């Protein structure tokens, strides 16, 4: 297992349990205790956890979301298949909003061959990768930078989005519940997504199958506010009937 993948799994274990011992992490991840201690040291330097005698605890504020560096590699093949399908909804000359999520980020590689797009995003890494093609007009919202998610949020980001009216919004979330809610772990991210939704004609949720039947802290919206869900696995009958009742169309990745 590569170091980055191991770091991601450590963060996921801590997100669920809040604390873990070196011995437990070593046994669970099939790595030596010396390797785990080095991993914990690196994660502590980055501000994600605090080492304690014999283990580590998750820092307050990281219990609802895994830092972007690790979310980017989490379920990456699933996210790529979803992103490839999402790009089929984009034509040349379109205007779109891309949120800062790691799933939507995967769309960038498929959009690089499209010309004359107008793209608005609050994602720092999304902006950087889009700049490499030079074939589209890219607007970055600015605002307060959340280092854990590499995203811009806050009133300045919201005001920036309010100046546009685009064809399509592509966004993600942390949880999709049978109560009909989309949720996220951060209040500022959830609020900015609500603003984005008001300024897009079509709203498309990119959501891998691990997020169904999950609930995070902050409600983004209900199902009646979205038009499509793109996911990676065929949903069961209960989910299909529920979403059909809200007129949400379900599309599956490659």
Image (cartoon, rainbow, N blue to C red):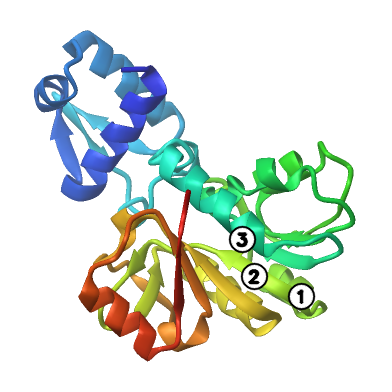
Residue 23 in the image: above or below residue 132: above
Q: Is residue 50 visible?
A: no
* Residue at image mark 2: 169
- Residues tagged 3 and 2 counted as in contact (Cβ below 8 A): yes
Residue at the image position 50 percent from the left and 52 percent from the top? 82
Decide which of 40, 136 is in the foreground and name it.
136
Pointer 3 local density, CA inside 10 Å: few below 14, some 14–19, many at least 20? many
Reading the image, the residue beneath label 1 is 166
Image mark count: 3
Query: Residue 99 shows which numbered tag?
Result: 3
Q: Position of residue 145 (x, y in %)?
A: 64, 53
In the displayed structure, 239 sits above or below 94; it is below
Observer-side mark, 3 or 2, equals 2
Q: CA distance from mark 2 to mark 1?
A: 8 Å
Q: Which label was assigned to residue 33?
A: none
Residue 164 vertical position relative to residue 149 in the rendered view, above or below: below
Q: Could you tell me how far apart the alpha carbons at marks 3 and 2 are, in whole angstroms?
A: 8 Å
- Asked if marks 2 and 1 touch (Cβ < 8 Å), the reply is yes
Q: Earlier in the sequence, mark 1 or mark 3?
A: 3
In percent of the image, x 27 and y 75: which residue is there?
Answer: 239
Q: Secondary structure at mark 2?
A: strand
Report whether 131 appears left or right of 229: right
Query: How packed is label 2: few (under 14 Cα within 10 Å), some, or many (20 or more)?
Result: many
């Amino acid at each position: 297992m590569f170091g980055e993948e191991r770091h991601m799994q450590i963060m996921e274990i801590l997100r669920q349990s809040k604390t873990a011992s070196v011995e437990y992490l070593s046994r669970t991840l099939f790595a030596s205790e010396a390797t785990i201690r080095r991993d914990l040291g690196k994660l502590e330097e980055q501000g994600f956890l605090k080492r304690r005698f014999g283990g580590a605890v998750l820092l307050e504020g990281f219990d609802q979301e895994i830092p972007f560096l690790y979310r980017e590699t989490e379920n990456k093949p699933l996210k790529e298949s979803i992103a490839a399908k999402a790009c089929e909804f984009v034509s040349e000359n379109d205007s779109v909003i891309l949120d800062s999520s790691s799933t939507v980020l995967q769309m960038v590689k498929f959009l690089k061959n499209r010309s004359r797009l107008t793209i608005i995003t609050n994602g720092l890494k999304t902006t950087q990768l889009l700049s490499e093609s030079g074939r589209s007009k890219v607007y970055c919202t600015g605002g307060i930078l959340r280092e854990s998610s590499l995203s811009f949020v806050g009133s300045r980001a919201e005001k920036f989005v309010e100046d546009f009216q685009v064809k399509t919004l592509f966004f993600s979330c942390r949880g999709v519940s049978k109560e009909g809610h989309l949720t996220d772990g951060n209040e500022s991210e959830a609020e900015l997504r609500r603003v984005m939704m008001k300024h897009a004609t079509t709203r498309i949720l990119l959501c891998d199958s691990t997020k169904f039947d999950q609930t995070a802290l902050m409600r983004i919206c209900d199902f009646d506010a979205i038009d499509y869900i793109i996911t990676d696995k065929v949903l069961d009958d209960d989910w299909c009937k529920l979403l059909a009742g809200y007129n949400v169309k379900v599309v599956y990745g490659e």
